Image (tube, grey):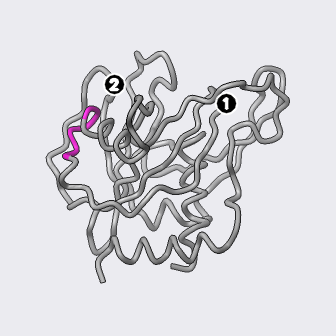
């Protein structure tokens, strides 16, 4: 059984568990309602190794939104695209990940960000050691973190911060010198819920 087959089977079992723990950045916050959400997609590219990893990016410090943060490759869904097509296009644009190298497992639980995006993570498998290259305008660097480390609940640290006069909670995952937090960490927590015990 391939890694993609094992992930698909684990997600199928996980989907029977019911709702994931996190569906929005806005949990516990009293904010002005967002009248229209912008559809977006990110690529959860799992490397086909004995010990699989996940490809993540470090955004440049010059971006208007989420500058310097760790993120999955991804962005807005353009007209005529679905989440899979958008995630693959964005990954190709951001880190030169070839669409032909991606073996689709499928989309997973959507996540709503405080900035008004409804994000669909698209999970799949890629060969190890692809010659990826960050697009300098958007991506400062890319790295691969171990899937087992990311999915381990012991590494999911819940934090609080004062934001716009309110106390907000968020997740943080620290791996080596990388700080993964906010929506990216929340989507990892959701994925861990779907894949636990597998």
Q: Quadrant of residue 193?
A: bottom right
Separation (CA) of disc 1 from disc 2: 21 Å
Q: Secondary structure at mark 2?
A: loop
- Mark 1 or mark 2: name the one nearer the start of the chain: 1
Nearest the viewer among 150 and 30 is 30
In the image, is residue 97 above or below residue 113?
below
Q: Nearer the viewer, residue 179 or 82?
A: 82
- Magenta highlight range: 93-98
Q: Position of residue 25 (x, y in %)?
A: 68, 38
| Residue, far bottom | 1
Most foreground residue, 49 or 33: 33
Q: Which residue is mark 1?
A: 114
Verify whether residue 95 appears in magenta: yes
Q: Is residue 31 above or below residue 119?
A: above
Q: Is residue 196 above or below residue 81?
A: below
> Per the image, is 189 magenta?
no
**In the rendering, at what x and y percent does residue 6 appear?**
39, 77
Q: Within the image, what quadrant is residue 74 found in?
A: top left
Horizontal relation, residue 178 to residue 109: left or right: left
Tag 2 residue = 138
Asked if marks 1 and 2 touch (Cβ < 8 Å), the reply is no
Q: State the mark number for residue 82.
A: none
The residue sitting at 34% across, 50% down in the picture is 55
Mark 2, Cα crowd under 10 Å, few <14 / some 14-19 / many 20+, is some
- Image quadrant for the N terminus? bottom left
Query: For numbered disc 1, what is the local secondary structure?
Result: loop
Left or right side of 180 for 20: right
């Amino acid at each position: 059984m391939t890694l993609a087959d094992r992930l698909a089977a684990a997600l199928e079992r996980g989907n029977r568990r019911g709702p994931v723990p996190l569906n929005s950045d806005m949990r516990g916050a009293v904010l002005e309602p967002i009248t229209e959400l912008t559809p977006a997609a990110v690529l959860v590219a799992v490397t086909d190794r004995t010990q699989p990893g996940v490809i993540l990016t470090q955004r440049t410090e010059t971006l208007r939104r989420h500058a310097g943060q760790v993120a999955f490759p991804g962005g807005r869904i353009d007209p005529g695209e679905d989440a899979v097509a958008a995630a693959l296009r964005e990954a190709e644009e951001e880190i030169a990940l070839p669409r032909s190298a991606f073996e689709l497992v499928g989309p997973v639980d959507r996540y709503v960000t405080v900035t008004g995006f409804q994000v669909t993570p698209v999970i799949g498998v890629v060969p190890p050691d692809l010659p990826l290259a960050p697009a300098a305008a958007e991506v400062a660097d890319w790295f691969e973190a171990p899937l087992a480390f990311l999915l381990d609940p012991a590494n999911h640290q819940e934090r609080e911060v004062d934001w716009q006069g309110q106390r907000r909670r968020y997740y943080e995952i620290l791996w080596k010198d990388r700080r993964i937090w906010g929506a990216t960490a929340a989507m990892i927590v959701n994925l861990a819920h779907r894949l636990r015990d597998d």
